[in-house]
Amino acid sequence: MQGLIQRVTHAKVEVAGESVGAINKGILLLLGVEKLDDESTADKLLHKVSNYRIFTDDAGKMNLSLKDIEGELLVVSQFTLAADTKKGMRPSFSSAGTPAQAEALYNYFVAQAKAAGIKVQTGQFAADMQVSLCNDGPVTFNLSV
C-alpha cells in the first residue's frame, strides 16, 4: 500500500465541477492499493499517516502529528501510485490491486480513520477527480508499509 502524504493548509477534490471533499489544515493522502495489501496493511498505513510527525511545534521543528494538531485528512484513491516505472517509458500496473480489492481497502481505510476520531473527507473512488491544494512547506512524503 502506497500513501503519498502532503501537509496542506487546505485541499479539495472536485468531480464534474462539484466539490466532493474539502479540508483545512491537515494531510492530503493519495492512496494506492497493491495486490498483496489487506486490512492489516491498511491499519499499518493509517497508524503511520495519523502519527507521522510532519507538523511544526513552537520551536519550528517537525514534531507534531495529525493527531497532535487535531488536523483533517483528505483521502483520495490513486491507483497510479502502484505503478512500476523501472522499465521503459510507460508505467506498468501489474502490481496494482484489482478495482474491487482497492475499493474495499479504500473504504476500510476511511472507516478506520473515522473510527479513530480523525476528521475525514474523501474523493470519489474511480472517478475523474480534480485535486486542488496548498502544500504547506512544501512537505511531501511517500509512505510504504
Image (cartoon, rainbow, N blue to C red):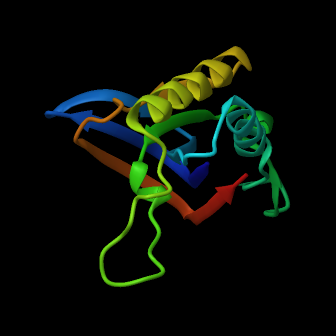
Q: Nearer the viewer, residue 26 or 113?
A: 113
* Quadrant in which residue 85 is drawn: bottom left
Q: Residue furthest left?
A: 16
Image location (x, y in percent) of residue 74? 50, 36
Q: Is residue 59 left or right of residue 17?
A: right
Q: Nearer the viewer, residue 37 or 122?
A: 37
* Quadrant in which residue 120 is drawn: top right
Q: Nearer the viewer, residue 50 or 60?
A: 50
Q: Is residue 127 left or right of residue 62?
A: left
Image location (x, y in percent) of residue 144? 68, 56
* Residue at 85% from the left image edge and 61% from the top image edge: 59
* Residue at 82% from the left image edge and 63% from the top image edge: 61
Image location (x, y in percent) of residue 50? 73, 38
Tally of numbered tags? 0
* Quadrant in which residue 72 is drawn: top right
Q: Is residue 10 left or right of residue 49?
A: left
* Residue at 73% from the left image edge and 55% from the top image edge: 54
Q: Is residue 111 left or right of residue 80?
A: right
Q: Residue furthest bottom?
A: 88
* Residue at 42% from the left image edge and 43% from the top image edge: 11
Compared to 86, does 117 lie above or below?
A: above
Q: Residue furthest top?
A: 115
